[in-house]
Image (cartoon, rainbow, N blue to C red):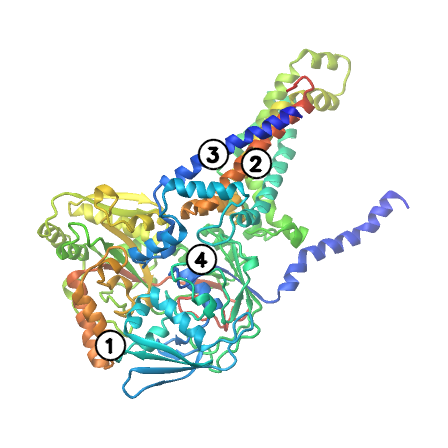
Amino acid sequence: MKRATFLKSLLPLAAAIVATLGTAPALAQGKVIKMIPGGDLRIIDPIQNASYISRNHGYMVYDTLFAVDSKGQVKPQMVDTFQLSADRKKYTFTLRAGLKWHDGAPVTATDCVASLKRWGAKDVSGRLLMAEVASMDVVNDSTFTMTLKEPFGLVLDALGKPSSNVPFMMPARIANTDPNQQITDATGSGPFIFKKDEWVPGNKVVYLKNPNYVPRKEPADGLAGGKVVKVDRVEWIYIPDQNTALAALTNGEADIFELPQADFIPMLQKNANIKLAADALGNQGWLRPNHLLPPFNNPKARQALQYLVNQEEYLAAAGFPDQFRVKYCGAYFMCGSPNETMAGAEAFKGQNLERAKQLMKEAGYNGEKIVVLTPSDPPVQAAAAMVTVQNLRKIGVNVDAQAMDWSTLLGRRAKKDPIDKGGWHIFHTYSVGYDVVSPVNNAYLQGTCDAAPAGWSCDKTMEDLRMAWAREGDAAKRKKLTDDIQKRAFEQTPYVNFGQFFWPMAYRSNLKGLIVTGIPVMWNVEK
Amino acid sequence: MLYVLKRVLAVIPVLGIVAVIVFLLLHLSPGDPAALIAGDTASSDDVERVRQLLGLNRPLHEQFFSWLWRLLQGDLGVSVFTGLPVAQMIGQRIEPTLWLTFLTISFAVLFAVPMGIIAAWKAGTWIDRSLMALAVLAFSLPVFLIGYLLIFGFSLGLGWLPVQGFHSLSEGFIPFIRHLILPAVSGGLVYMALIARMTRATMLEVLGEDYIRTARSRGVGNTRLLLRHALKNAAVPIVTTIGLGIALLLGGVIITESVFAIPGIGRLTVDSVLRHDYPVIQGIVLVVAAVYVFINLAIDLLYTVLDPRIRY
């Protein structure tokens, strides 16, 4: 055979091999949804770690006893039936039949009790609930009871808590881990199975459809209802560069872009192949002063910060277009939520720099250095810090804006030391609406001193009010307590709300049934 | 052989010094992985408990010797965040970086060496000036800008190539190469410019030598003259530049990896530094330092092949 003829004969074979090599993985994977998540999954324990990316991972892998629907109502999820005793002190929960862990073992009441104990040691609502629980007892494999010391109005709300830390159910062998120690086994009973062997931190997280998952019969509604999975595989592709992420979505290499940079929003709105969807509650920005150090150990100085803030200024700096921000929201518990109230807000509405200056003076401020932790990376926090620095300077405050990356900031803000030993005065962050909507789960409202998050607000009156709110079963009385709590919040200013904004998720228009809750859940969605 | 052995043994104290410096720098710099793990709403007690569980509250020397003891047993430790072994995390990332480095440098050499030879051969002409202008342009443009332009043109515009990601060779040659063309070109242009200028300069020097004039007077053809007589003698500095390029690329492809979302060592390094994931950073630095030392050794040994006058 001539050399040219021989080579020619090999061409179809080579083409076939190349074609096979090129398409084999795609054929094997079935229906795949690719999402660019808002962060990199580093910690697979959604109880130990309250980050939203760990929470989102939790929703893929785990299930919950209760869940909230799109109207914010708590509905049974893993629980089939529950009863409350006549004295309102004892709940009996019975699990749905057929629930299984990913390893095939049945879900038992023992697992659920262990999971609740671990969650109750970490979560702000969980701690409140556990303080009221006298005992949790296993009745049989599918039934357990929760006995309370006193009637507590928020048991179901706590068990159906939608955001960090979510009371996810885990097998007892895993749930018995110290709550501050990260678990390494992601066995759950949720609609997806975590493929740990394909996990590349900083790049890719893979979930497979759980073939043994038994969804509820009701249609999916918010985080409640039937979690029917309509794809075979979900991949989270972490793309740290926002421009590349945008290009990947535009080019069809990704189906969902969870948190596109705010200034991309107008561009995405013009793309016919892309849809944007934001949850109804949105997010709330937080300016947190350090309550331990002067001048912010004085409520007057903290109130000065209220007068310093023009919410529109902050949200514009973060880049959110008009339709994705609330013009003004004075409610500590989010505008548009069941607990929205304007009690106490009127006096602080709008920016008043003169009043802010006067209050700083009354608080004893005399030109000392005020340290504002100024992060360079998360765009909302970075923009907010710059606005605060600018406004503080406008009222004559001697500001030391210390630039650092976000992880350094998290380390730094844990320091209770005085300024000359690395202490700080102000930092900024934000929270999704779910974590703010009630006096119980709004972590930065806590006045628990050392046990409160960084900033260490210490306010016994606030704690008494929060506990009274949690115990109150009557809706009208609870509404009154909500107003009292907010008035107290404005007086004491544990933090300043720098604005409510909606951060839309962008997705390819060929996706159907995507549930928009502010948490990217992947059941019900079709491609 | 004795030289090779000596050089390999010399690596050990170098790595030891690197290990100590990196450990101290990391632990003395601000930042707290425990606070990051405990999360946004954690209390000080929670942070302290996490710190205890990770062993980060122990005295620095104790942490160092504990790490060193494990290292001597071949254990790089586990990531404080993911809980995965550091060796596994580096292993996951080494393949994309090696392929990206190989293709980047291959692209650069493939174009740069002919460019440099032609520019030297046509020195002073418009061809030389055009090629060197191209090299200056390639050297001046930031890698990320080239990357975005390539994405805009070849991915979003023409739709020929993907925007991002990496596919292992085991997943098929076509997806593998399609995902690496744009990153290799965008990262390779700078090295192409560097190697082309180095080749031109060295070739110009060699082309002025007496033996070249003699060869030319004896009627040796241009191709043979350039490739066999001139290039071979100009090879040592060019190989040095290529070797340095490989070493720099292995540790410095972070921008290319970030723009094209390639899960390589560069991105792992930056992610770990930002999170203060001490065991991972220490592991990467040790591995990269070892690779640097061995690449230098390989270049030194290559000199003896290219220039028989060199002996160690």
What x and y, as percent, mark residue A369? Answer: 19, 43
Query: Dot 2: what SS?
Result: helix
Q: Earlier in the sequence, mark 1 or mark 4?
A: 4
Q: Amino acid at mark 2?
A: Val
- Assess disc 1: are there few (<14), some (14-19) or many (≥20) residues with their C-alpha within 10 Å of its C-alpha: some
Q: Amino acid at mark 1?
A: Arg
**Distance from the alpha carbon under mark 1 to that under mark 3:** 59 Å
Chain for mark 1? Answer: A
What x and y, as percent, mark residue A84? Answer: 33, 85
- Seen in the image, is A302 located left or right of residue A9? left
Q: Which residue is mark 1?
A: A471
Q: Earlier in the sequence, mark 3 or mark 2?
A: 3
**Distance from the alpha carbon under mark 4 to that under mark 2:** 30 Å
Q: Which residue is mark 2?
A: B291
- Seen in the image, is A476 located left or right of residue B82? left
- Seen in the image, is A103 located left or right of residue A330? right
Q: Which quadrant holds the C terminus of chain B?
A: top right
Q: Which residue is mark 3?
A: B18
